[in-house]
Each structure stands twice: as C-alpha cells, then as structure tokens.
Amino acid sequence: MIRPSYGRGVLAPILHGALESLEARPTSIFVLMDRRAKAAVAPMERALDRFGVPTQVRRWWPSEENKTLQGAEALMRWMVRGGVDRGSLLLAVGGGITTDLGGFAAACVLRGIRWGAVPTTLLGMADAAIGGKTAVNLPEGKNLGGAFHMPEFVLCDVALLKGLADREWNCGLGEVVKTGMVGHGDLLSFLEEVPATKIRRPGDAALRLALESGEVKLRIVEADPLENGLRKLLNLGHTFGHALETAAGPRKLAHGEAVGLGLLCALRMSEELSISEPGYRSRIHALLRKCGLPVNYPGRPPSRSELAQLLRRDKKAEAGKLDVILPRVPGECLVVHGVEPSVAAAVIHRELGN
Ligand SMILES: NC(=O)c1ccc[n+]([C@@H]2O[C@H](COP(=O)([O-])OP(=O)(O)OC[C@H]3O[C@@H](n4cnc5c(N)ncnc54)[C@H](O)[C@@H]3O)[C@@H](O)[C@H]2O)c1
Ligand SMILES: [Zn+2]
C-alpha cells in the first residue's frame, strides 16, 4: 500500500517528485480542484508546469449535494471530452469530498485510470485520503456508491491548511481524537498538552496530528484493505454519529461534530458494561471541548424509537443488528456484535438526553 507523504511547504517538490516516480509517465493530467483550497494553487501549478505533461484543470465548489453519481458523470464526461486515455492521471486536490469524488470517477472512467490525492483539509490528511476508499452519495444515504481504488500517491502538505475554517479544523480534530482512541493513545496525550492556540494552525502541531493519525489509519488499512475485520475499528463513534448527524441535519451537526458525540455515546456504553474506566469518558469529554466540538446535542434529541430506526438503517447494520465499537483504554477498542438498535438508542438518550 502506498505510504502518504507529509510535510510543510513542500507541495511543489513532492508533487513533482511523485509524478516523476510514476512507473509510466502519464499521457495527460486532469486536475479536480477545490476552489476553496487557495493555498494549493501556486505550488500545484509550479509542479505541473515543470513536469510538462498536458494538463487540464476543473475547479469546483464541493458539497455533499454534488458528491453524487451525477457529479461523477460530469467529471468523467469532462475527461472524455478532454481526450482521457488509459495512460492519463487524475489529480484530486481538496478535502474528503473532492478526493472521494475524484477517486470514484478515476475508478470508473475507461474502467479505471490512475489517480493521486492532494488532501487540503486536516480530515483529508488524517483520514479521508488514506486507504483507497472512494465514494459518492445516493439519495438513500451517504457514501452508498463507491469503489476501492488505490491512489498512486497521497501528498499531505499542512501549509495548504491555511484558510481552513475553524469548524473544518474542529471536524478534523474530531476524527483525530477517534483515531487516537482506536490505535494511538499518545496522540490523545499530545492533543491534551498542546496549547489550544496552536491546534488550528498550519504548523508543527497540525503536522504531527495529521501524520500520526494517517499512520494509524494506514496500519489498520494495510492489515485489512477490504474492510473485513480490523478496519471496522475505524468506525468508532460513527454508528451513533451517523444517526445523530441524520437526525439533526448536516448544517446543525457536521460530520466530525457528530462523530465527537458518537465517541461519547460509545464511551458511555463501554462504561456501563465495565469495559472502560469512568475517567476515560470525562477525559475525552474535556478533549472534545478543547477541540471546539459540541458535547451536547443541538436542541432536543430525537425520540428513542426514531433513533433506533435511524440506527437500523446504518449501512454497516446486518440483519437489523449493529456492530458497535467500544473503547477499552486509550489506543484500544473492541467490537461487540449483534447489538439491538433499541439498546444503542437508549445509550444515546442516557448520554445526550437532557
Ligand atoms: N474515503 C474515506 O475513507 C473517507 C474517510 C472519511 C471521510 N470521507 C469523506 O470525506 C468527506 C469529508 O471530508 P472534508 O471534511 O475534508 O470535507 P470537504 O471536502 O467538504 O472539505 C470541507 C470544507 O473545507 C473546504 N476546504 C477544503 N480545503 C480547504 C482549504 N485548504 N482552505 C479552506 N477551505 C478548504 C471545502 O471546500 C469544504 O467547504 C465526507 O464526504 C466523507 O464521507 C471519506
Ligand atoms: Zn468520519
């Protein structure tokens, strides 16, 4: 599996190096570029000019509403009109939406061309761009269409995070906390120690958070590339989180915020089953607050039956039952199979009902 590269202020040389190291020189390059990722423009252009292969750039405004089959179709048609062939390469420059859609279109067009990812959000560098999962949303739910399609390279330059909105930083931090809980307890201690003013800056702290989360994800994905077992651990907080995200609506509760609440619910369940010590939940509670993430549901939580209904629809549910990931100690979780959605809904109510 390819190992992502991490650095600060290094995009132009590492992109040039990654292109030069491809086994076969691309015949053409198609760039899908997030319009908000302004800091990526100049270094990317420098690298591509120097590389000298014909390049076309499509700038877009990503949103969950256009991470769809129609969005992928528009991208593929643009590439076909631009003369894409089996030797072409797609470069996706942006957050998780851009790398998910770009990777998906690269997996489909001409039955698959090579692609490379340049994530420009903390969430992308720590999580979304790593592991080769690509996706589009369907009207019935998020990420229900998709393919495993490994990128040729993943280049993470934290200097590109300049200009990222606070809420996006916070969402990335939520996933970093999750990753620390799944596989790297020291990451939690580091987040606790680093001064709050340094967390949301494109500096050394962000570099360490992105790199160490990325490494945990890579280690898990390498052990289980097609998500048959171990990779499920990365779903910590997500079964609860997705239900809360859907119930509240995406503008009220962003994905990373919902995951943060999901972590608290998972910790509550662990604590009630004596799988974890009570101190662990209060520790994560404080850490989420430090990361600017909510620890309460916005407004009145939905009823237990509504929550159970939403949990039952989770795409990872099997025969109406859930696999729930439960934290044990920092860096270690276990999976409990066959949990009734009504039981999980009751946990949410005990944690977030007020
Ligand atoms: N494939 C996977 O394994 C995987 C894993 C986790 C999440 N995801 C997906 O990732 C998506 C979430 O990722 P995200 O949070 O990066 O979302 P995103 O792509 O929407 O980016 C968040 C926001 O930040 C903006 N942005 C991006 N880079 C910027 C920059 N450098 N400066 C300023 N603004 C910038 C974007 O335009 C967007 O408004 C979801 O669709 C999720 O399903 C995929
Ligand atoms: Zn997530």
Image (cartoon, helix red, strand yellow):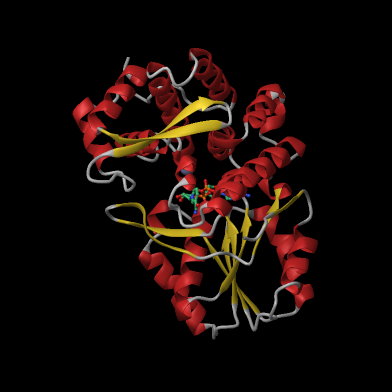
- In the image, residue 5 above or below residue 46: above
In this orientation, which residue lies closer to the viewer: 271 or 74? 271
Using residue 265 as the reference point, say whether residue 41 is left or right of it: right
Residue 264 visible in the shown view = yes
Residue 10 coordinates in the image, percent (x, y): 79, 55
Farthest-out residue, left = 305
Residue 134 coordinates in the image, percent (x, y): 47, 60
Residue 61 visible in the shown view = no
The N terminus - image quarter: bottom right
Residue 89 coordinates in the image, percent (x, y): 60, 75
Q: How many discs appear?
A: 0
Using residue 60 as the reference point, say whether residue 69 is left or right of it: left
- In the image, residue 50 above or below residue 297: below
Residue 2 coordinates in the image, percent (x, y): 65, 61
The C terminus - image quarter: top left
The residue under the point 33% across, 24% down is 348
The residue under the point 19% across, 29% down is 305
The residue under the point 49% across, 45% down is 230
In this orientation, which residue lies closer to the viewer: 112 or 102? 112
In this orientation, which residue lies closer to the viewer: 344 or 118? 344
